[in-house]
Image: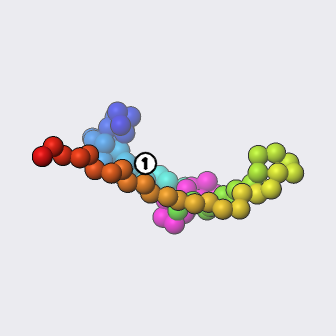
Amino acid sequence: MRALARSADNVDAGLDKAADKLVALAHEGDRWAIDHIAERLDGKVPQGIIGGDEGEPAIQIIQRQIVRADPKPTDG
């Protein structure tokens, strides 16, 4: 945050300056800049999930579970 503030009049102006530079690099064909902008706009490409060692099977199921604790009993 301090570096951004130092690079311009304030943090927001510093972010704008950095974003302008990133876009300029992308327009020049810098692959890193293009990829970075695409990841920010579209999200990162999901990575494959594989086993830990060679020969281990890939993970078959990923389960997301939300658990809610019971509310505390009230006195009375």
Query: What residue lies at 33% left-to-right and 51% top-to-bottom?
Result: 70
* Left or right of 40 on screen, residue 48: right
Badge 1 crowding class, 10 Å Cα cut-off, few under 14, some 14 to 19, many 20 or more, is: some
Rendering colour mode = rainbow
Under circle 1, the secondary element is helix
Query: What residue lies at 76% left-to-right and 51% top-to-bottom?
Result: 51
In the figure, 62 relative to 12: above or below? below
Q: Quadrant of residue 10?
A: top left
Can residue 23 be found in the magenta stretch?
A: no
Label the magenta part by its dominant secondary structure: helix
Residue 37 showing in the rendered view: no
Q: Quadrant of residue 60?
A: bottom right
Amino acid at circle 1: Ala
Query: How far across and down, in percent of the image, does residue 35 sit?
Result: 59, 59
In the figure, 10 relative to 36: above or below? above
Which residue lies most toward the left here?
A: 76
- Give the magenta-colored segment's residue range: 31-42
Q: Quadrant of residue 67?
A: bottom left
- Residue pointed to by mark 1: 18
Query: What residue lies at 35% left-to-right and 37% top-to-bottom?
Result: 1
Query: How far across and down, in percent of the image, does residue 31 sit?
Result: 64, 57
Q: Which is more toward the observer, 33 or 57? A: 57
Query: How far across and down, in percent of the image, does residue 27 sit?
Result: 55, 63
